[in-house]
Image (cartoon, rainbow, N blue to C red):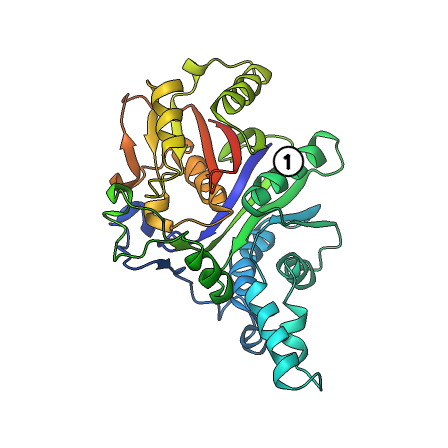
Amino acid sequence: MFIKDLSCISPQYTYDETFFESEPKVHTGNRYTALEPEYGALIPAGLLRRMGKAVRMGVGAGLPLINKNPGLDGIILGTANGGLEDCLKFLNQIVDYKEGTLTPTNFVQSTPNAVAGNLALMSKNTGYNNTHVNKGLAFEGALLDALLRLEERKAKTLLLGSIEEISDYNYNIDMLAGSFKKEESNSETLLNSGTPGTVCGEGAVMFVVEAERSADYVAEIVDVEQISHADQDKLKEKLSRFLERNQLNYSDIDTLILGFSGDNRNDHWYTWFQEGLFAKSTVYTYKNLTGDYPTASAFATWMAAQLLSGKKLPSQTLYTKKSDRSAEKVLVYNHYKGIQHGFILLSK
């Protein structure tokens, strides 16, 4: 599966080339909110006013790609909390208005598939339309869906992506559960904090993927794998089979993108992965710039594709440099709360 085009809205200036040309934005506190572009030229004002944040970001990242690449055969997205904020607003309206007449906007946008639905309606795309909502493996599920559609020749080109928003409701629950840091931190010191908890992020990442390689392709997504509730032995066994399936050895992986989040309860997975299995690979990180959220691996995939296309990533993303050679085989490894683990393999 080949990436033909891509777009990203995140807590960094990734919507244009600024991310690669200037210093990353420094965030403080426990919420790294997305830096949204101007939507005025893309979305009619009347429609924009009624859009929730998840839908707004998803349309803002996805619609330009659809317009640039007409004739897509479908839209496949992954999200864990997309639409949750509108869902809670709608439920609160039921209470406030005593089950009387309610505004339809929050109801329409309250489901996770609202983003894919809006993209299809605005672009008049009547093809395959699916949204995966399986927490920390939602993007990996969407990726697998896209791979299967293309391999089975049921599609030639697809829009693939993920959307995540910071919902106050979900944030407060995760905060009470100890998911986020209680002390003041910033993106420059996050990974070395050595304390429990991480920070919350959000964003939308979109790819146009195709079955056949075109002349201007960006990178290849070779394979994806996932596992839940695994110990280190099971994770290593799964990884070994994953590499063997793609006719690779551990030494063939020259670059890793790992989801270090500054949480001293879970970062040991990445330390073990790096030092125990890929000691000679260069390592990049990203959650110090974007925060942590269930589909953060989509941002890592975007970053891997940019690296493979020849872009130079900001120095703040470089964790360990082992070689001066350019990236050829990049492995993205991310876990969600130490429970759901996913591998994504990309090639130049």
In the image, taking residue 14 as reference, residue 115 lies left or right, namely right
User: Residue 132: x, y in percent?
Assistant: 65, 47
Q: Residues within 10 Å of mark 1 (few under 14, many from 20)?
A: some
Can see residue 327? no
- Please name the residue shown 63% across and 74% down the image: 91
The quadrant the N terminus occupies is top right
In the image, taking residue 321 as reference, residue 110 lies left or right, namely right
- The amino acid at mark 1 is Leu
**Residue highlighted by disc 1:** 144
Nearer-the-camera pick, 224 or 218: 224
- Please name the residue shown 54% across and 23% down the image: 234
In the image, taking residue 327 as reference, residue 221 lies left or right, namely right
Task: State whether residue 108 is above or below residue 57.
Answer: below
User: Residue 51: x, y in percent?
Assistant: 57, 71
Q: Quadrant of residue 146?
A: top right
Nearer-the-camera pick, 325 or 187: 187
